[in-house]
Image (cartoon, rainbow, N blue to C red):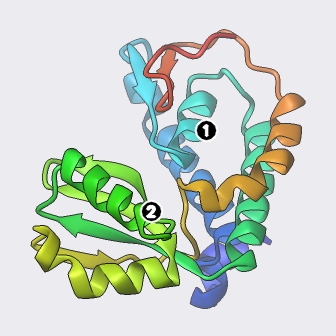
Amino acid sequence: SLREVCLDGPLWRLTRTEYAQPALFALAYAQWLEVADLLSGRVGAAAGHSLGEYTALAAAGMIGYEDALAVVAERGAAMAEAADAEPSGMAALIGATPEAAEQITAQRRADGGRLSVANINAPGQVVVAGGDADLQWLDTTARDLGVRRAIRLNVAGAFHSPFMEPATERLTAALSGLDVIDGDFGVWSNVTAAPVAS
């Protein structure tokens, strides 16, 4: 029961991506429902980062809540399977520009590593993803590379990176049955930075 996992945990289960993704989606959508009437007719557009894009699409009425939840659950399961296949994770680079992060990850890949830029969170904070060996290398070399600090994130895998490639087939299949219709307001894709079309 998603409700039981959200309210009762245990925490180790709730933080696994196959449970966390549907739980975060359901919570975000519930928050939308709390304010939807207040914002009726006043929302011009929406966007969401990664998982949040599904919430934006459901809030706009472009996809149904239950359909979106089913896709999100499949996405979480596929990503969990990919994460379990190989020890990996993510780290936030504090004090790094996107260009510096790209340079650092390129350097690591040139030396045989698998580190890549995953998210540009804010000015001075870029998240990278890679295998355990890549993150250990980063722990010991970040300051030498001009990064003020590298903070490991408490995540189950190297999301937003090539480590998630094994999840694409399952997610593509889940998405192929999803009908996207015109919504109450536009949603901008976080991949293309363009409006999502029906």
Question: Could you say which quadrant of the image residue 181 lies in?
Answer: top right
In the rendering, at what x and y percent does residue 65 appear?
72, 38
How many C-alpha atoms fall within 10 Å of the one at disc 1: few (<14), some, or many (≥20)?
many
Q: Amino acid under label 1? A: Tyr
Report whether 68 appears left or right of 117.
right
Query: Residue drawn 30% across and 51% down?
Result: 102
Q: How many numbered discs, if any?
A: 2
Residue 127's disc number: none
Residue designated by label 2: 109
In the rendering, at what x and y percent does residue 27 appear?
55, 56
Q: Is residue 187 above or below residue 84?
A: above
Real-space Cα separation, disc 2 to disc 1, in angstroms: 32 Å
In the rendered structure, are the residues bearing label 2 and label 1 in contact, judged by CB atoms less than 8 Å apart?
A: no
Q: Pick whichever of labels 2 and 1 is earlier in the sequence.
A: 1
Residue 39 visible, this orientation = yes
Q: Secondary structure at mark 1?
A: helix
Q: Nearer the viewer, mark 2 or mark 1?
A: 2
Residue designated by label 1: 54
Residue 2 visible, this orientation = no
Q: Amino acid under label 2? A: Arg
In the rendering, at what x and y percent does residue 51 appear?
56, 48
Q: Quadrant of the C terminus?
A: top right
